[in-house]
Image: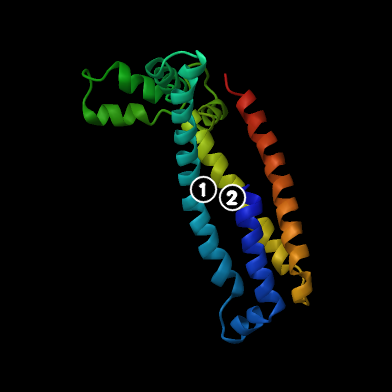
Amino acid sequence: LLSGRIGGSYSGEVATMQATAQNKLLLTLGISPVAWTFGPSLSASWIASPLLTLAGTVLALEIGARVGPNYGIGDVEGYRKEVRDAVFVPLRLRGAASWSEERGRRTLMEHVIAFTDLRCTFSESYADAFVEIVTHPVCFHLIKSVVFMTIIMVVAEVAARRKTDLTPRGVPKVITTSVVGGSLLVIFADWGFSQLLLKRH
């Protein structure tokens, strides 16, 4: 959906600029066309994609809480409690565990020093700690949204700028290339994220 809507519209905009020599005009004025279009668009997408992910997830979970009881699937409060328990699981890091276990027995500085121990409670490996943090449900969905949006925007940028002699007739082909290429790379990246999720202990 994002690849078609955002990637397609962005690649169409940049391809139209390329086809109508607006990029050459920007270069003549001493302005980088990439900095003029890609920088602000990528920054905006990095802000918008986590917000869209958060809003969509909250809306879907709330609709599930309201519709489920109509079909005999639990009650609203039970559903919300299960969702909270599934989404906000505790991080199994030594620093986080020591913070919650010994809350009143240490000074603030001792807590801060203990909290910086990023190793897992079940392993000495920092790779396991990385997987633990990245695959935590909240972080996982936000990281995925930013990575997917970056892929979509980079593919759109490359597709729109790869032909220097683009004509207005070629703009729809650029949009199609951007949407298809972005979608395929997002599917491949999603496979990579699922492999990372399988490494969670």
Indicate the secondary structure of the residue bearing disc 2.
helix
Quarter holding residue 15: bottom right
Mark 1 closeness class: few <14, some 14–19, many ≥20 residues within 10 Å = many
Q: Is residue 29 left or right of residue 182?
A: left
Indicate the secondary structure of the residue bearing disc 1.
helix
Q: Nearer the viewer, residue 115 or 43?
A: 43
- Mark 2 = which residue? 149
Q: Position of residue 11 (x, y in %)?
A: 66, 63
Q: Nearer the viewer, residue 1 or 73?
A: 73
Q: What residue is drawn where x is 57% and y is 40%? A: 144
- Compared to residue 58, the image places residue 31 above or below, namely below
Q: What residue is drawn where x is 50% and y is 41%? A: 53
**Total labels drawn:** 2
Q: Is residue 42 among the parts visible in the rendering?
A: yes
What distance separates the C-alpha of mark 2 from that of mark 1? 7 Å
- Compared to residue 112, the image places residue 5 above or below, namely below
Q: What residue is drawn where x is 53% and y is 19%? A: 123
Amino acid identity at mark 2: Met
> The C terminus is located in which quarter?
top right
Quarter holding residue 197: top right
Q: Nearer the viewer, residue 45 or 193?
A: 45
Residue 154 circle label: none
User: Disc 2, disc 1: CB below 8 Å?
Assistant: yes
Q: Is residue 92 among the parts visible in the rendering?
A: no
Q: Position of residue 74 (x, y in %)?
A: 46, 13
Mark 2 closeness class: few <14, some 14–19, many ≥20 residues within 10 Å = many
Q: Is residue 36 left or right of residue 3?
A: left
Amino acid identity at mark 1: Ser
- Mark 1 = which residue? 49
Q: What residue is drawn where x is 65% and y is 75%? A: 17
